[in-house]
Amino acid sequence: MAQGSLVVAEGVRLQVLQPARRGFEYQGALSLDVPAQDFCLLGDTIVTTGSRRSGPVLHLYAIDGGGIGAFGMVYRSPNEMVNEEMSLGQVACDGAHAVIALATRGPLAEVRGYRPDGALLWRTTFSGAKANRIEDTPGDIGSSSRPMEFTVSTA
């Protein structure tokens, strides 16, 4: 991908535009496995967030569009709707350290750091963040607002 390229996420496609004499010129599109909520570039790898049917949240693609892998289950519940809510978030790529950071925007209020191979490096939750607590029990789901505690764990 050329310096100054523009990548636009549109559902299950990423469109690539290259700088041209007058603005940008369409170069092509990559098909994705799931709709991208967010994405970043890690060298020649495109990292997107998005899940379908309680699957992995982070998806990696080569610049040519080939799938590399998927990982990052945020929460595991028999209720797919709960899994989807817990999986919403933004992604940032740190090429200097080969780290993919996923910040959930659902009830967990946490950031997780991963290696490109899917290995979990660290997990941080934020003190004082208010979120709805989901009680995921067979036959009954309830919620209440409570402050979250600060926790750091390493894998």
Image: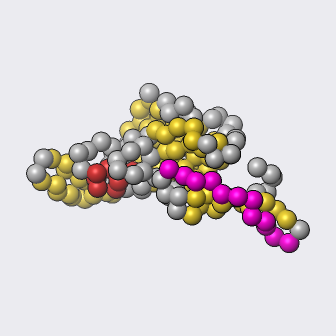
The extreme left residue here reads 139
Q: Nearer the viewer, residue 61 or 152?
A: 61
Q: Is residue 125 visible?
A: no
Residue in view at x 63 percent, y 53 percent: 30
Mark yes or no: residue 73 visible. Answer: yes
Residue range of the region highlighted in magenta in the rendering:
22-33
- Whether 26 is among the magenta residues is yes
Tell whether 51 sits left or right of 131: right
Query: Which residue extends farthest right?
Result: 21
Residue 19 pos. (x, y %): 82, 62
Q: Residue at x 21, y 58 (%)?
A: 144
In the rendered image, the vertical position of residue 43 relative to residue 52, given as above or below: above
Q: Is residue 99 magenta?
A: no
Looking at the image, residue 83 sits to the left or right of residue 57; the answer is left
**In the image, 24: left or right of 21?**
left
Model colouring: secondary structure
Q: Main secondary structure of the magenta part?
A: strand
Residue 91, given in percent of the width and then of the height, sits at: 54, 50
In the rendered image, which quarter is residue 4 located in?
bottom right
Residue 85 sits in which quadrant?
A: bottom left
What residue do we see at 49% from left, 30% from top? 119
> From the image, which quarter does the C terminus lie in?
top left
Could you tell me residue 99's position as x and y percent?
59, 37
- Viewer-closest of 64 and 128: 64
Residue found at the far bottom of this picture? 22
Q: Residue at x 67, y 39 (%)?
A: 95
Position above or below: 151 against 13: above
Q: Position of residue 92 (x, y in %)?
A: 58, 48
Total tally of numbered discs in the picture = 0
